[in-house]
Image: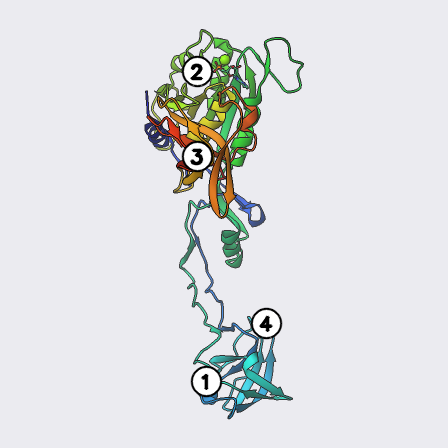
Amino acid sequence: MLSVSNAQATILNLVQPLDNQRDTEIVDLFAAESRILATPVTSPLDFPHWDNSAMDGYAVRYEDVQHSSAEQPTVLEIIEEIPAGYQPKCTIQAGQAARIFTGALMPAAADTVVMQEKTRREENRVFILAAPQSQEFVRKKAAFYQAGTQLLPAGIKLNAPEIAVLAAAQCANLNVYRRPRVAIFSTGDELVRVDEPLQPGQIVDSNQYALAALVRESGAEPLLLGIVKDEPVALSKVITDAGAIADIVLSSGGVSVGDYDYVDKILESLGAKIHIQAVDIRPGKPLTVATLPTPSSPSSPSSPSSPPSPLYFGLPGNPASVLVTFWRFVLPAIKKLSGIRAGWEPVFLKVRSHDELRSDGKRETYLWGKLHLIDGVYEFHKADGSHSSGNLINLAQTNALAVLPLGKTLISPQEEVEVLQLIKP
Ligand code: AMP
Ligand code: MG
């Protein structure tokens, strides 16, 4: 059986990121939040665009004011007032100053700004009460960035700081990667939709909803294909249809060793290549990972110009297994596919455990719970109730998974534990 880390490496190796030519779209900057930049951004502008003042005060010539003090202030004539957004008209001559405000353009021949607090005003004269540094409080043109230098590289996620940079560089429309397309379906004769009455033996298909939410949170687009019976013909059709429209296909159920677990057999019959059939993890052992034949040319390996083979995840049916295997294996794959150039792997934190954590030591074990901040230190609290993979209810409010590595049977209260932090990517 494959170890969790080998399974992660195998999966990430199979993922081919979206293409920076074929798989992009233009979005308005207001709709760019959380999207992945597909083209580096270079600004035609210098930052700052012009020499400007960093303070409210007086624009002066340093040589005029360098010996100023409270006892012997320099007195300058104010020849102009320059608010932000206006172009100064005058040139500062010896003995002159301009009233200036933060962000306003420096007038010609002035090289220094004296902050207002170090001056005294009398009508059109200003008394400079302290000697400034030469060029103090002047933001020089191009001091931060020069036109032509790269502002943002491709492959980064756009959050508020990046969006502000793009706005400043006048990029109103952006080239971003399209959202990865993730097809989702549930398998099982026992499953009904949320709006159907439950007959004896039936359960609600909660996995479809959980997966749709997880996929959406990851920045990808869920394509919902519904519930499919444990029946080879129906399964064949839905897998073929899913492979034709999606980059990643997620099914839940039907990958175990039961008589009605058909998924792996059907994948083989469709010419898919199965890379993983079981992983040393609890919950989530019966995990199938396969590459589907490329939609355009079944059975032939994809050429560089054709889209890559869709990646298939046959997740186990148990609701807890679905969530854990998504967080541990599917999310990193979606991240890599999305065009993000680094940081695909899950983030693990070392924290203190509030509770006793147990495992049989035979598989890498993930226990769900919540991180609480206690006096500035994170503490993991295991969810109450059963940690059976069939128990969905106590997963609510989970924000971390504690990990007990292979061979580890006990973590005592107050001991250190590694947790997988479940933050929105
Ligand atoms: P399976 O992997 O198909 O053997 O399913 C394992 C367990 O998960 C069974 O108890 C199923 O009833 C349950 N299960 C399977 N699919 C779903 C689903 N879509 N939503 C909720 N529970 C499911
Ligand atoms: Mg089943």
Q: Which of the two discs, 4 and 2, sits closer to the camera? A: 2
Mark pair 2, 1: CA separation: 78 Å
Q: Which of the two discs, 3 and 4, sits closer to the camera? A: 3
Q: Which residue is mark 1?
A: 62
Q: Amino acid at mark 1?
A: Tyr
Q: Secondary structure at mark 2?
A: loop
Q: Which mark is residue 84?
A: 4
Please provide percent x and percent y for residue 380: 47, 36
Mark pair 3, 2: CA separation: 36 Å
- The residue at label 2 has a CB less than 8 Å from ligand 1: yes
Query: In the drawing, does residue 57 fall left or right of residue 36?
Result: right
Q: Which residue is mark 3?
A: 413
Q: Secondary structure at mark 1?
A: helix
Mark 2: give few (<14), some (14-19) or many (20+) Cα within 10 Å.
many
Mark closer to the chain start, 4 or 1: 1
Question: Which residue is farthest top?
Answer: 259
Q: Is residue 257 above or below residue 417?
A: above
Please provide percent x and percent y for residue 176: 48, 43
Q: Secondary structure at mark 4?
A: loop
Q: Which mark is residue 424?
A: none
Looking at the figure, which quarter contains the N terminus?
top left
Query: In the drawing, does residue 199 fall left or right of residue 318?
Result: right
Q: Is residue 249 above or below residue 60?
A: above
Mark closer to the chain start, 3 or 2: 2
Q: Which residue is mark 2?
A: 255
